[in-house]
Image (spheres, coloured by chain):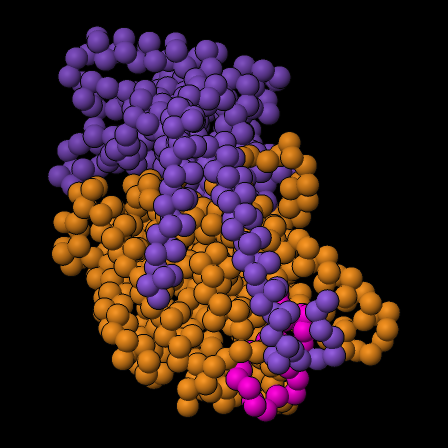
Chain colours: A purple, B orange
Amino acid sequence: MDVNRREILKVLMGGSAVAAATMTSAPLASAGDSKEFELEPDAVGLMYDATKCIGCRACMPACQNANGLKPDVGGSGGLYMQPDTLNAHTKNLIKLYTAADGHERSFMKQQCMHCVDPACVSGCPMKALHKEPHGVVGWDPVLCIGCRYCQVACPFNIPKFEWDTINPKIVKCELCRHIVGKTVSQPACTQVCPTHAVVYGKRSDLLAEAHRRIKENPGFYFEDRVYGETEAGGTQCLVLSHVDYSNLGLPKLGNESPAAKSRQVSEFVYRGFLTPLVVYGGIVAIVRNRWKEHLKHAGTEGGEVHGEEKRA
Amino acid sequence: MTVTWDRCIRLKEPLKTKPFLVFAALAVVGLLLGAYRELLGLGYVTGLNDGYSWGLFKNWNVTALTALGSGGYAVAVFAWIFNVKRFHPIMRTAVLTSLLGYGTGMLALGFDVGRPWNFVWLADPRTWNHYSVLWEVAVCMTSYFLLALDVENMPPFLEKMYRSGDPTKKERAMKIFNFMQKTFPFGIALAFVLPSMHQSSLGQLMYLAGPRVHPLWQTPLLGLLYLLMAYILGFTCVLLTLALSAYAWNLGWDSETMERLAQIMAWTITVWLVVRYADLAYRGALGYILRFDRFSIFFLVEELLIIVPTVLLFSKANRKAPGKLFRLTFLVCIGGLMYRFTPTTLAFSPLGDYRYFPSTFEILMSIGFTALAVAVFLYAVKTFAILPAAKGQIAAEEAMRPFDTL
């Protein structure tokens, strides 16, 4: 065993030398720098100001109609739409948060945040989830294999899956991309909102407007900050509220996109595809010698040959 | 009785024994339920939901059990790269367990994906998202299965062809075999690189889930830890398979080989433990261990199942005693499977109020896939010369030259 242990060390050291060589040859480029995952200058999004929302839920049936979704009437005994969570029939949901003491309240519009660098797009094996023009995160039924990695990956738990059919789709807000710019100028939810609590526009304009509101009402909005400006690398849908965002189902996230972090780890190991190629070459070289030795060994031990044919 | 396993044999046993029929029946039940799922949809046969959208099929049958199917990979590394010659006679058993582990894992995956017909687009490189860790797993696992595992399992088939007596078949077998001999080192290297890639990627998958995986498991090193655990579980699978086979069919006990396997396994676990705890310490997550919430308890159970037997396996006397070796390896196996399973399910907390427990159908399907692997194993060892044996072992056939050189 001692001999073998020494050999293991030798091989491991050889391997790390190769790894070290490849690591220094390529500067540690952050895969997140790639242009594909940057904010487009003409990216669009929504801004939802919870303090302006009156909870009328007009946006919900508008969304159902625009997207051809069945109304979810389960919670009401069949009378009216009453989903309790986003689901395969609900891409957009207005919820009310009430603090335990009953004083603090805020509505929340739950839907896809259209991340600048989305985890779902980065994780999707087949480019079914992808960035459309203007940074909208779209889903393509022709490419989706239904693996549901987007559901595991999304930090906001947004994509939903049709569990009760053999032709299941991923359901999530796509900012009405099938009609905006064609028959209508804005998504259904912003179109019908009576108080303009949710508005559609260029992300840069929306962000400027959000900051204007914060500046005009210092101390009114939670931490004087817009949720989505930097969270998870930034989202194209922005949220303003006077209550702690984490109470509204918006988790505390770092400023780096999880997708970029994941790509950095992969890039660190793979170096393009250099590492696997170098390792492959090394193993071929080692095994070739072993293999010759092995054949020689097998061929000379005549006493152990079974069957009819001896090796030539 | 201690013997030296130096050849592979075909068992002289009838195929239709009681255990075989039980496993075959379980497999049929699983596959019938699979057909039911294809007719209705995933929601009808599984307990999956929008919070826990990955369950038994992906997290157990693929993520956990393909690690168990890494025996061919783990043992081959030591047989071919570190040149442990004793391991050559057990290679056929090892690569067969791998073929079956991966085969049934991929079968489970086939039932799990919602829109499998779109797999055809894998043929078009324009659809590949090479940033996707899951894409890497899908392509790499399929290539490993088709290009490496199938080839590694060829020699027993070729032997069978050669023995059939038909001269054209005989010639064809030799032709294929000669080609395999020439390209063998390239194939073995592929059988090393591909599993290294996808076994680590299976862990890396969960890294994208970020803070929703508990800090006791979530780390940028998930890939490395999963890869090392694939080695460990690969060893446990080969050890347990050989021990059970030796017991069931009186193959004798090659103490040297088994002891060596266990020793290498114990060292690999030591490396794994060093990485695991260094990482926990570096990330400042050690404090979570003794909170005695459900995560801390999962962690403690997992670690005890791995650490205690490993310490005992460092004693040569324990490794030499067949019963002890079996029991200790079995404990490591359970602990290791827990480690591979936990980050995906037990330590995964989706946003919102979701619960997941696999449905009865889902459990039956999952068991069915594994039962299928066992049934095929029983069929294979009675049809081909697979299991290792010593000289003088009663056998239907022995592996023959030159096919046993691979």
- Residue B9, given in percent of the width and then of the height, sits at 60, 81
- Residue A221, given in percent of the width and then of the height, sits at 21, 20
* Residue A267 placement: quadrant: top left
Membership of B68 in magenta stretch: no
- In the image, taking residue A112 as reference, residue A242 lies left or right, namely left
Membership of B393 in magenta stretch: yes
Residue in the picture at 28% in, 35% down: A251
Q: Is residue B384 visible?
A: no
- Residue B39, given in percent of the width and then of the height, sits at 64, 60
**Stretch in magenta:** B379-406
In the picture shown, does residue B159 fall above or below B219? below
* Residue A112 placement: quadrant: top left
Q: Is residue B307 visible?
A: yes
**Quick one: quadrant of the C terminus of chain A?**
bottom right
In the picture shown, does residue B189 fall above or below B321? above
**Quick one: quadrant of the N terminus of chain A?**
bottom left
Of B173 and A119, nearer the camera is: B173
- In the image, taking residue A134 as reference, residue B327 lies left or right, namely left
Of B312 and B357, nearer the camera is: B312
Residue in the picture at 47% in, 81% down: B4
Residue in the picture at 14% in, 55% down: B291
Residue in the picture at 33% in, 41% down: B220
